[in-house]
Image (cartoon, helix red, strand yellow):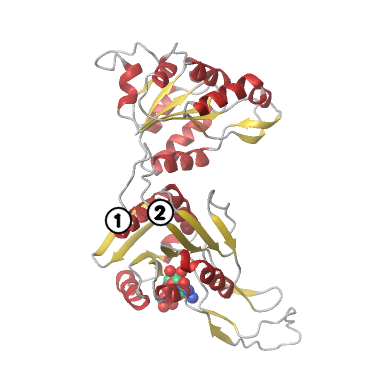
Amino acid sequence: MILLGLTGGVAAYKAAELVRRLGERDIDVDVVMTQAACGFITPATLQALSGHPVYTDMWDGRIANGMPHIELSRDKQAIVVAPATADFLAKAALGLADDLLSTLCLARDCPLLVAPAMNRQMWEHPATQRNIAQLRRDGVTILGPDSGNQACGETGMGRMLEADALAEAISAFLAPKTLTGKRVLMTAGPTFEPIDAVRGITNRSSGKMGYALARAAIAAGAEVTLVSGPVSLPPPVGAAVERVQTAAEMFEAVRKHAARADIFIGVAAVADYRASAPRRHKIKKTEEKQLKLSMVPNPDILGWVAARPKPPFCVGFAAESRNLDAYADAKRRRKKVRLMIANLAQNAIGADDNEVSLLDDAGIHRLPRASKARIAQQIIEHIAGLCGTKPRKSR
Ligand code: CTP
């Protein structure tokens, strides 16, 4: 559980969304608001979203020993202040404690993360930059800020990170470092096999599950190389991304990195066949009354990695439309991979959540429907367990 502190800035509205995004990642939140924050968003909203009472006052009688400024942080993994105003950062840098949130920050025994939100001139002011430098020296983690349009109408640095990016950063910060020192090689997204200059064959895949897994592996401390087919997703921060189009290119990239990998995760929906002789120019229907495509099989990338003399720990994905467990287990045995993640294609493709089964030597382990970010985290925990790495907490 974390403690989320809100100070008085327009970006307070993003904190409501942040609480939801954290909930999707199973991160429970207690909320503390300054008086100024209550001018932008009401405690009732944060109470409804977090499912817990919201605290705004040093003298709140609901804490049994009358010391909310100490008690509220004692069971927390971290305090996150979002939005963090210039004024709050100045107070925190100096160690001032004149309200509930600033006192909690000073009296805490857990890490502090802040997400600055302010006008660009306030952000660039030497006083703010001095305070940020001081907070960094004190071990505080600074999340953002971003640049872009500001509530005041100006454009520049100082915008608070969006709720999704903040939730991602917080969950990465809290994740047990189970894959520290491990090198993870992954494939994700579809492949695109050209037929002519403008057409091709592909598989339906958004890449969301693979990208979520890459982020979860990075959060667990791994060094990640992601070989990605064509997707419209931002690259996971911290991953070395190699973009490819065809299965042959994906295979080439995997061959290049396979020897260094400790873990290989094949998430890509690789096209099983490609055109044997793709045309250089666009096929004209006036010229070809009937089109016959000759296709040849693509290399099995996962199968090749698993068959190496000293293979990494191999994980495969099976997207089936029926007979999920039986087909997935047969695939696991055929490809000789330690772990196969099975999902129903019709439930998973393009969606933001998923429901999967993990098949390994010990049997079947089901993960109930959850966001792909949460599913990815659980898969990484499972892989770390099978690889024999012990969790190391980030604090
Ligand atoms: N895979 C691969 N290279 C291929 C095909 C698949 O690396 N040429 C990987 C996928 O990334 C995934 C797993 O293998 O991890 C899927 O297995 P596969 O048997 O190829 O699945 P399907 O193509 O769906 O097989 P089938 O048509 O038999 O269901």
Residue 297 pos. (x, y %): 52, 83
Determine the image quadrant of residue 155: top right
Q: Is residue 207 visible?
A: no
Residue 84 pos. (x, y %): 52, 25
Which image quarter is the C terminus in? top left
Q: Residue, x 46% and y 57% (percent of image)?
A: 209
**Front position among marks 1 and 2:** 1
Residue 222 pos. (x, y %): 44, 53
On the rendered structure, is 195 left or right of 213? right
Looking at the rendered structure, the secondary structure element under dot 1 is helix
Residue 11 pos. (x, y %): 56, 28
Q: CA distance from mark 1 to mark 2?
A: 14 Å
> Which comes before the other along the chain, label 1 or label 2?
2
Front residue (pair 179, 151)? 179
| 315 over 53 or under it: above or below | below
Looking at the rendered structure, the secondary structure element under dot 2 is helix
The amino acid type, in three-letter code, at marker 1 is Gly
Q: Which mark is residue 376?
A: 2
| 61 over 173 or under it: above or below | above
Q: Residue, x 41% and y 19% (percent of image)?
A: 106
The amino acid type, in three-letter code, at marker 2 is Ala
Q: Where ligand 1 lies, by quadrant?
A: bottom left
Q: Residue, x 71% and y 87% (percent of image)?
A: 288
Front residue (pair 287, 139)? 139
Q: Which mark is residue 385?
A: 1
Q: Which mark is residue 111?
A: none
